[in-house]
Amino acid sequence: MSAGTPFVPPVADYAFLYREAFGRDIVASASGGALSADDAVEIIAGAGEFAAEVLAPLDQAGDRVGARLEDGVVRLPDGFADAYRALVDAGWVSATAPESAGGDGLPQSVGAGLGEIWNASNAAFALCWMLGAGAIHALDAAASDELRETYLTKLVSGEWTGTMNLTEPEAGTDLGAIRTTATPRDDGSWSISGQKIFITWGDHDVADNIVHLVLARTPDAPEGARGLSLFVAPRTLVNADGTLGDRNRIETVAIEHKLGIHGSPTCVLSYEDATGYLVGELHGGLAGMFVMMNSARVGMGHQAAGISERAYQGAAAYAADRLQGRVLDRPAGATIAEHPDVRRILRSMSSRIFAMRALSVFVGDLFDRAEGDADVLRMAELFVPILKGWASEEALGVTSDGIQVFGGMGFIEETGAAQHYRDARIVPIYEGTTAIQSNDLVGRKVLRDGGVTVSRLFDDIDETVRALQDSEGEVAARTAERLGRAVGAARRATDALQGFADAPRDAYAVSVPYLMLLGILAGGWMHALAVVAVSAHAAAADEDAARLTDADFYGAHHLSRVHALAETVAAGEIV
Amino acid sequence: MSAGTPFVPPVADYAFLYREAFGRDIVASASGGALSADDAVEIIAGAGEFAAEVLAPLDQAGDRVGARLEDGVVRLPDGFADAYRALVDAGWVSATAPESAGGDGLPQSVGAGLGEIWNASNAAFALCWMLGAGAIHALDAAASDELRETYLTKLVSGEWTGTMNLTEPEAGTDLGAIRTTATPRDDGSWSISGQKIFITWGDHDVADNIVHLVLARTPDAPEGARGLSLFVAPRTLVNADGTLGDRNRIETVAIEHKLGIHGSPTCVLSYEDATGYLVGELHGGLAGMFVMMNSARVGMGHQAAGISERAYQGAAAYAADRLQGRVLDRPAGATIAEHPDVRRILRSMSSRIFAMRALSVFVGDLFDRAEGDADVLRMAELFVPILKGWASEEALGVTSDGIQVFGGMGFIEETGAAQHYRDARIVPIYEGTTAIQSNDLVGRKVLRDGGVTVSRLFDDIDETVRALQDSEGEVAARTAERLGRAVGAARRATDALQGFADAPRDAYAVSVPYLMLLGILAGGWMHALAVVAVSAHAAAADEDAARLTDADFYGAHHLSRVHALAETVAAGEIV
């Protein structure tokens, strides 16, 4: 079995983003000087090396062999357990955990880079790490000292892994329909019964225990989502001295046969009088879950960028090697990478990936700066659904492009291009579909504050347009014109949306196009910031030229889509 | 094993298209009155019934079990051989074969409907029929009486199946690189040696013999594609009395492990001194192959529509049944089909499918009318790459939308939504990638005649804009405004493309966006014709209202994309 596409970590892009794309060393700002961008680049390079050596070679095996349920126990392919132990031993689990939870507390802008790298090298494996990170955030926000001591420390060290148990057969998007019950016991614990589905890494053999965070309904709780409470339910019960005791009454009933991410076990878990412990306030489950959810949604931006990057690397390597036909206006022996349309596809991929990557870092930095600044926090929160929704939808196009570069070979599983296409298809679905992201964006983030936050975003983009106008070069001038026109269209689309305030179906019927509009615009903004930074260089390096070409390409091929979407948004619901 | 999504043939749409969408009974025109639209509707209904009962129930088994290579022989899943015999016995193979070849010679507009139906019910199975149809056209155009008698009659009756043997490991898009050799023998036959890959239905157990049409190079032939000749090489040799003799020296070396269409065996065939017979002129292979290729490319439009339709039916049925959450402004108990965004996705699917279906029929009708009318033939040929390229790319979006409607269940293979997404991914690749279609469009169909044919198309669309302006109703008015603006953008994009005549890389770097622009525009035109037809009805039926909503939706959500693409085209190559 081949090891699939090799993985080369995109260190230069992260160096550019941490050091200069945003006009300052964002790592130093976020860490109060404890770390510098140079330190962060070393961290990214180290993670990249680990991912290339340990995680990437398992990616195709995870897909081919996949997770299997054998005698009620989930088994991962050979190598997964060793890789997980190596990840923990190298300190990569605790690296991004908050200091308040005992982790290293790396800035979230650096966490964005790590997230992309784990996902690019092995998206199915990365989910185990991502779910653990979400559980850490949720417990850190709300758990009692006892729960922190027993569970949070083990999650931060990586000894145990974490999950989110939300979905049930009749409760997917609508969490209010959750029927799993939690009944108090005399000893202070709770008895949990019910069935949870789509539980990512819900069972496995790579770590000693699993910390399930479970949404359930207590007796006499209010109807709907406001009656839900959050519980910790370990796969294996923990004795008072911290050692592992009996198995909890949680059974893995089945694992799903999925389109992609076969190396990530998606479990049906049956709780029958299982033991759980309340996290935070009674009926405060949704708030606790939103902490995990926000972390997971931002993480989906990293996953979208990571899977896309891997697809790009595979396609670019194939194109640079493949000879096929005479290339127009190029000497004999030119590879297909020089064919005008293959070049178009590769640029379309790389320019969208840069946009996703830069926006992931930008959003991480917003969260890094949000503590104590309500305006920055609101901006960060505006971007959560945009990053998740837009990047995940774009990943579908990028991984499809990856197949197209391979031609007929792209449809053959052996080349690996198809795996990325299959893996990517879940990203716009889990952690809230694109529709859910767009409802959050339109309802909670745009209409609720009368468009104040989104207008501030447009003002910030206008500022970049002015900086472009003051920059040297044709690309800067073209980008200024395109971005200025795009932000104008975005303002008009926002006005149209606000005009639907009395006819909310009109707003929600175009909320996904509106989300995509803002995502594409934000991607264009990221390229524009790169153009401003590069244009200030005294001498242009090859890397600078590539950044300008990507920005110019994005403007002509992607930012242009904003105008079509603005027309769609203005139409409201078509009845 | 479940039988997957049931299939309901879209008979009403075909009735509308054959009877009135184009302002006349196109079936009566094409057949010189021998058949009417009503006859065609009966044929479509009959085919639909057959497809729903016989082919659709095998679709998911074809995917799950797939074609297998066992001891050098390809085996199809249980039921495939019986289904093929039933198809032949019901006369569906000879139905679309030309009268000159002994078939029923149904108009190509009716063939478009049959093509969609076979593909919607079972795309992997339909390929067997499509490849046979292509081989029939190629032999009918060029074969000697002896070859016609021995092979063509068996293909038309359906007793034997046909294939296209073009691709080799180093010769995919670039057929000029073909290395398979054909050496003359004393008895008039040829000795063929070489390896062919990606041979669809290249081996199987559903019929007694396979008629391979093979491109090969003869001794002292000119270099490149102009040196290729076309041969018939049967899997099993045929005795002088027409009975089957020894196996030909053609070995099935492997079948591919593919992303989709698992029920269609994709073979690696090794020819070692195999026996073949020259078809048509020496070195005239490419011309013969283009006959098959044109037929196959138009057929890919039908496949794109068919797979999309099946994905839509599955998604619409799920949405109409699934309860999840309270629906905005709808009474309790409303299904997710009423959620504004699910409704958006379903309309986005149905409106694009109508556009594909109508354009398939329109192109079929152009070919039906092309004999003896060079202008109509040029218009038909302009549309071949547009239909193939645009419809196949749109099928990716439609089948992706199909998954999204199912939410998390869409990612689980059992629901069948994922199969359509996987199956559709090959359509923009085989029979010439979208880039190849766009090169054909821009180079041979637009730039070569100085834009004359494409300008006639724009004039025809303008005429529909005027008819819309004369029609009653808001949708007609909105559609007139949108279509008029879109055709204006298309004219400007064409001017820009013609401006690149001296810098061909600029033209070929935006040829795919230009193809998509014309496809989306043509789709909008099809909807506009429907609006004109429906607006003339004295009383509007439910079906009429649905057509108007689809047209209005297409205008706001898809035709609007023309403007973004026009901006992209004008940019040329980004360097």
Image (cartoon, coloured by chain):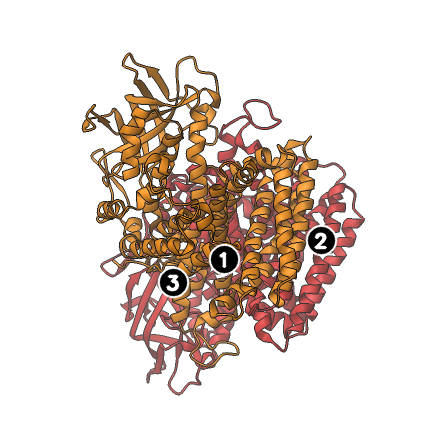
Chain colours: A orange, B red
Chain letter, disc 2 residue: B
Disc 3 target residue: A409
Residue B504 is situated, as x and y percent measured from the top left of the image, at 59, 75
- Find the distance from the CA under tag 1 to the CA under tag 2: 45 Å
Judge if badges 3 and 2 mark residues of a common chain.
no
Foreground tag (1 vs 3) = 1
- Find the distance from the CA under tag 3 to the CA under tag 2: 39 Å
Residue A306 is situated, as x and y percent measured from the top left of the image, at 41, 52
Q: Which of marks 1 and 3 is nearer the N terminus?
A: 1
Disc 2 target residue: B483
Mark 3 secondary-structure assignment: helix
Residue type beneath disc 3: Met
Chain letter, disc 1 residue: A
- Does the residue at mark 1 contact the one at mark 3 (Cβ under 8 Å)? no
Question: In this view of the protein, which residue sits in the foreground, A488 or A247?
Answer: A488
Chain letter, disc 3 residue: A
Task: Residue A227: tell me if it is visible.
Answer: yes
Judge if badges 1 and 3 mark residues of a common chain.
yes
Mark 2 secondary-structure assignment: helix
Disc 1 target residue: A20
Residue at 77% of width from left, 41% of height from top? Answer: B473
With A536 as the anchor, is A100 left or right in this view?
left
Residue type beneath disc 2: Leu
Image quarter where the N terminus of chain B lies is top left
